[in-house]
Image (cartoon, rainbow, N blue to C red):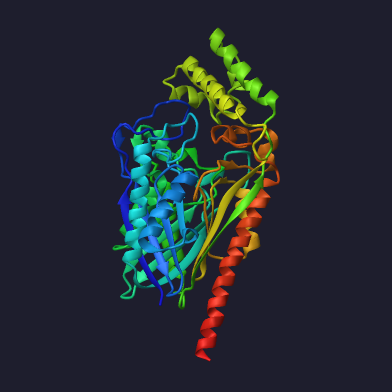
Amino acid sequence: MFRAGVARTRLTPFWGVELTGWGYYLERRWQRVHDHLNATALAVDDGERTAVLVALDLMVIDDPFTKTTRERIREATGLPPGSILLTCSHSHNAPAAGGLLGVGACDPFYEDWASRQVATAAILAWRQREPATARAGHEDVSGLSFNRTRPGGVIDPRLTVLLINRLDGSPLAVVANFGAHPTVATELRPWDVSRDVPGMVCDGLEAALPGATALYIQGACGDVNFLREFSTPDRCDEPARRLVERALIALDRAEEMADPVVAAASETAVLPTRRWTREELEGDRREAERRLAADDIAGWRETIGRVMTNRPDDMVRRHGGDERKAVRAMCRFHLEWTARMLRDFETRPETLSTEVQAVRIGDLYCVANASEFFSPFALDVRQRAGVPELMLACYANGRIGYLPDEHDIAAKSYAGYQSPKYCDQFPFTPASGPRMCDAMLHVLGCCREMALTRCRRMENLVE
């Protein structure tokens, strides 16, 4: 029998914790709580296998956070780590649990507490499982987002939604998956704690489905933002309102699954990277040292700032309009990232190992990776997987930064050239994204095979 449980705990940080992203060395310690951050867990089983999805209202989590949290869940439930999926909303009005150099200091006490809160949500969801039914659907939603890396670039418009009902027909849990950078609220309230659009979607779904607890799974948004026109007080709720409307339409058409099968698979993908050259490292250091010594801000947009920010003028505004302060912060970053990399860049392996994971709940599949995934790769996975109800969970089980396509790698863009610096990694190559896609398809195939094995076994029992 299919069973499901859901639970939620708070992740709102205590006073003094910095929010992550949005600029270099801003010391963006939050000033107000606009809306609370949560960890929301959904646990499901089919009588044989169990899987747990946990949606975190954090910017990113790293491998140690994932490992520690999964171990806490395993100790209480006995669940294998590979059946536990942790994924972040990527709100820029939230802390991170796993440092990104220069874009928000992490607090070890908060990280440990957040891990315990995430584990608690998962454990409670697992303990509260009850007989349930499931249905899933999707809609393509246009007019909300755009590809920020190139004019006319592709996006993944797919909104996928899962509804879990109790046996009496009342809603228990709803999961929505869509990909777009959640920075609508950040533009308006950069010093507030907030879930941004993902939180508004959850609130809207819970209002429309009384009794349900909602999870938002962030999709492939490495190259995608919500339209900037939504970052105004009178329009900031539009993306969430439209996503909720379309989610309800998808669910209205969806049919109840017959005896949903649960499966989970996880493996390590080994992605090719390119070693930094000594000239690249020393070039960044020389420019930073020269500018700091001479207090020189001339032409920084064409040199030090070209890849450090997508929006140079906004970076100055985020430093209070002080251009010198913004340039000094970028120079500080260059000195710190190169000092860290120069220690061992010649001996590091020229590959990056990272987890990919898939979870199946009946007709719905969810495939996860730790990157800021680009849209062309998302569309490739969708096309090759051939699964109508497919969720892409990014920022999951770790963080490897942006996974750009060949276009951005060749352009040495923010995603292709800056992200590996604050992640303390080598840059990805044109082969990295396709390798990730292949790994994601492989774990999806493993989930299919597990389900087929169970079905064959059940057929044998019937015979």
Residue at point 47%, 58% (across, down): 81
Residue at point 56%, 11% (across, down): 296
Residue 331 appears in view: yes
Q: Position of residue 433 (x, y in %)?
A: 65, 48
In the picture, measured across the screen, residue 5 lies left or right of residue 448, that is: left
In the picture, measured across the screen, residue 154 lies left or right of residue 204, that is: right
Q: Relative to 11, is 166 above or below?
A: below
* Location of residue 149 (image quadrant): top right
Q: Relative to 366, is 62 above or below?
A: above
Q: Position of residue 56 (x, y in %)?
A: 40, 49
Q: Position of residue 366 (x, y in %)?
A: 52, 60
Residue 387 appears in view: no
Q: How many marks?
A: 0
Q: Position of residue 453 (x, y in %)?
A: 57, 76
Q: Residue furthest top?
A: 294
Q: Relative to 203, is 136 above or below?
A: below
Is 292 or 196 nearer to us in this picture?
292
Is 201 or 36 nearer to us in this picture?
36
| Quadrant placement of the N terminus | bottom left
In the picture, measured across the screen, residue 33 lies left or right of residue 326, that is: left
